[in-house]
Structures are given as structure tokens and as C-alpha cells.
Image: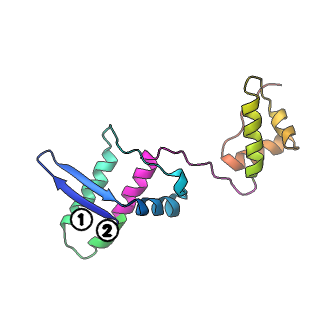
């Protein structure tokens, strides 16, 4: 089992230990996040009601010895891992490239151009010309690639 739980003290602290290997497996299989894009914050300084709820459900299941508890514990551990990754991952996932959108190389060209010309007004026409396509085609493929449209500037 990828998880260990212990209920401690009068202040009711719940310690849950999930193996790094399991967290990485969930990140890769469920959220399509590669291991090098995963770094969880070691401490949370705010109260997380979802984390509390999942943890208490997990504790309740561990305290019972019903048939089916193992499956429920494994499911809750997966839910806990997904929540931790979504809420506490320090590294932002790379945007997913949709089928038919700009290629990774084209996106890198656009990013480089924008970075090099931040001090100037960047026009949609400039970005489209950079990739040798019409503004309409550039906008459509850009949106397919990163799920947002480029903000056109006047002119």
C-alpha cells in the first residue's frame, strides 16, 4: 500500500505518508505531468478543507475492517494524491498542445519573439508573419495549441 496513516495526540494531528514513487505515478498516469514537472510544497500554512475531508475519510476506512476497505483505501489514496498534486505542485504544468495546433517549435518561436520584443508593441500580424501564415490561421492554430486566443492589438 502506498500510504501510511497515524492519528496522534490530544490536538488530533493526522500524519499521512505517501511514497514519492506513488505520487509520481499518479502525476504521470492521471494528470499527465512528468516527474521533472512535479515538486510539492513541503508545508501548507492554510487550512485545506478538502484535504481534511479526504484524510478523515481515509482514516475512517483504515479503522474499519470491512470487505472492500482495501479498494476504498486505494481509491482515497489516489484522490488524496491528485489533490496534493493539483493544489501544492510548485512547478506549473506545460500547456498541452492540441492536435492541429501550432507545433512545439512554432510556439517556441512565438515565445522567443515576444520575449525579445517586449519593449515594443507586438501585433498579431507580426506573429503570423513570423510563422508565414495568415492572421486568421495563426489565431486558430494558436488557440488549438494552448486553449486561449492571442490578444490582438490595434493596427
Question: Where residue 143 sits in the image (x, y, percent)?
Answer: 71, 45
- For this rendering, which residue is in front, 150 or 81? 81
Q: Quadrant of the N terminus?
A: bottom left
The part of the chain drawn in magenta is 76-100
- Residues marked 1 and 2 touching at CB (< 8 Å): yes
Please identify the residue farthest to the left as the structure is shown.
10
Could you say which disc has been placed on residue 61 in the image?
1
In this rendering, would 10 be left or right of 151?
Answer: left
The vertical placement of 14 against 69, above or below, is: above
Mark 1 to mark 2 CA distance (whole Å): 7 Å
Residue at disc 2, secondary structure: helix
Could you say which disc has been placed on residue 72 in the image?
2
In this rendering, would 128 be left or right of 37?
Answer: right
Mark yes or no: residue 68 visible: yes
Q: Quadrant of the C terminus?
A: top right
Instruction: Give me the residue at 76% from left, 49% from top.
Output: 105
Question: Where residue 19 sits in the image (x, y, percent)?
Answer: 37, 61
Instruction: Give me the residue at 30% from left, 66% from top.
Output: 73
Please identify the residue farthest to the bottom as the structure is shown.
67
Instruction: Give me the residue at 40% from left, 59% from top.
Output: 20
In this rendering, would 3 be left or right of 111?
Answer: left
Question: Where residue 129 sits in the image (x, y, percent)?
Answer: 87, 38
Which numbered disc flags the more N-terminal residue, 1 or 2? 1
- For this rendering, which residue is in front, 119 or 64? 119
Mark yes or no: residue 152 visible: no
Residue at disc 1, secondary structure: helix
Count up the numbered dots. Answer: 2
The crowd level at tag 1 (other Cα within 10 Å; few <14, some 14-19, many 20+) is some
Instruction: Give me the residue at 41% from left, 63% from top.
Output: 22
Q: Quadrant of residue 33?
A: bottom right
The vertical placement of 64 against 153, above or below, is: below
- For this rendering, which residue is in front, 91 or 144? 91
Amino acid at each position: 500500500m502506498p500510504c501510511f496513516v497515524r492519528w496522534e495526540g490530544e490536538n488530533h494531528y493526522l500524519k499521512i505518508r505517501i511514497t514519492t514513487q506513488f505520487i509520481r505515478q499518479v502525476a504521470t498516469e492521471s494528470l499527465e505531468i512528468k516527474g521533472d514537472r512535479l515538486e510539492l510544497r513541503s508545508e501548507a500554512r492554510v487550512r485545506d478543507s478538502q484535504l481534511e475531508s479526504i484524510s478523515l475519510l481515509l482514516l475512517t476506512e483504515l479503522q474499519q475492517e470491512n470487505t472492500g476497505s482495501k479498494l476504498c483505501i486505494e481509491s482515497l489514496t489516489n484522490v488524496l494524491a491528485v489533490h496534493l498534486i493539483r493544489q501544492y505542485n510548485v512547478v506549473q504544468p506545460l500547456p498541452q498542445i492540441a492536435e492541429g495546433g501550432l507545433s512545439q517549435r512554432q510556439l517556441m518561436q512565438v515565445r522567443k519573439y515576444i520575449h525579445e520584443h517586449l519593449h515594443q508593441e507586438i501585433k498579431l500580424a507580426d506573429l503570423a508573419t513570423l510563422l508565414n501564415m495568415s492572421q486568421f490561421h495563426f489565431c486558430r492554430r494558436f488557440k488549438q495549441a494552448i486553449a486561449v486566443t492571442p490578444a490582438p492589438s490595434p493596427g
